[in-house]
Image: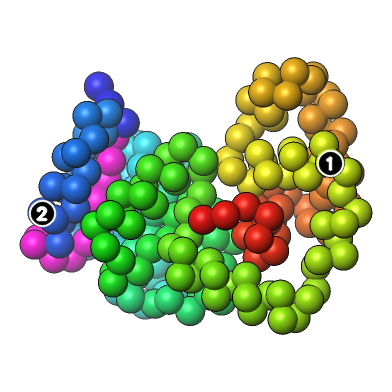
Amino acid sequence: MGMKVLIADPYPITREGLKKVIGQYTDLEICCEASNKEEFLTGIYKYKPDIVILESARRKSETMELVKEVHNKAKNAKLLIYSANDVPETVMQYMELGVNGYLCKNCSVEEFIRGLNQMMKQGHYIQESIANRLKNGNSRKNTNKSKISLLTKRELEILILVSNGMLNKEIANKLCISERTVKNHLSSIFKKIEVSDRTQAAIFSIKNGVINF
């Protein structure tokens, strides 16, 4: 059995299109389709999907509530949102809630596939046009560039790996160091860039162009 995917969209024709795109993956299996909030919550609770693809035409507050439900009911699920809203500040609000990927409805099929691939492999993806606007806006403010310069070469390397969704054990294996050493580096990294957890570190990396999307 492949990774379980839940698709949430109110329109059958859109769900059919997404199913055709996802059907290109032999390791993905549609476990549930949801057309409304009730079906979505039931599907999350019943199937514990590995990937959730959520349309967000609804009110932002409702979508954010659904995001929280995903983390409560399917803690290991990767969550991809696609929306008509391409405001960088809104996108970052979703990412801060733990959303793994964000695409706009005007994206091409090719970009949707690229985004899904990168989210599955690296843990995060933001549509390139939004990510560029976010980085450009942040560079004008020039708020955090000095923090990056405080990091050692190894700390920057670990920040990139963490921001791409790797766990401490995976980082330790990749770099041939102990998990304790990884934890010590992370403590130093978080202190230098003034964040308190991995999600905030990933947001910092996105905003400052430490990782590319």
Residue at 51 percent across and 41 percent down: it is 122
Residue at 33 percent across and 76 percent down: it is 84
Which amino acid, mark 1? Lys
Residue 5 falls within the magenta-colored stretch: yes
Q: Where residue 138 appears, x then y in whole percent?
A: 68, 75
Task: Please state if 44 lies on the left or on the right of 70 as rendered.
Answer: left
Is residue 26 in view from this perspective?
yes
Q: Which mark is residue 78?
A: none
Residue 137 falls within the magenta-colored stretch: no
Task: Please state if 107 lies on the left or on the right of 149 as rendered.
Answer: left
Q: Are the residues at dot 2 and dot 1 in contact (C-beta closer than 8 Å)?
A: no
Q: Find disc 2 in the rendering and name its residue.
A: 16
Q: Is residue 198 above or below residue 94?
A: above
Q: Where residue 175 appears, x then y in whole percent?
A: 73, 24
Is residue 69 in view from this perspective?
no
Q: Find disc 1 in the rendering and name its residue.
A: 153
The magenta stretch is: 4-13
Q: Point out the frontmost of discs 2 and 1.
A: 1
Foreground pick, 38 / 152: 152
Residue 134 image-quadrant placement: bottom right
Q: How many marks?
A: 2
- Give the structural element (helix, strand or loop) at label 1: helix
Residue at 68 percent across and 28 percent down: it is 171
Q: Is residue 160 above or below residue 88?
A: above
Between the residue at mark 2 and the residue at mark 1, the CA separation in whole angstroms equals: 46 Å
Q: Earlier in the sequence, mark 2 or mark 1?
A: 2
Q: Is residue 128 above or below residue 29?
A: below
Q: Where residue 153 appears, x then y in whole percent?
A: 84, 41
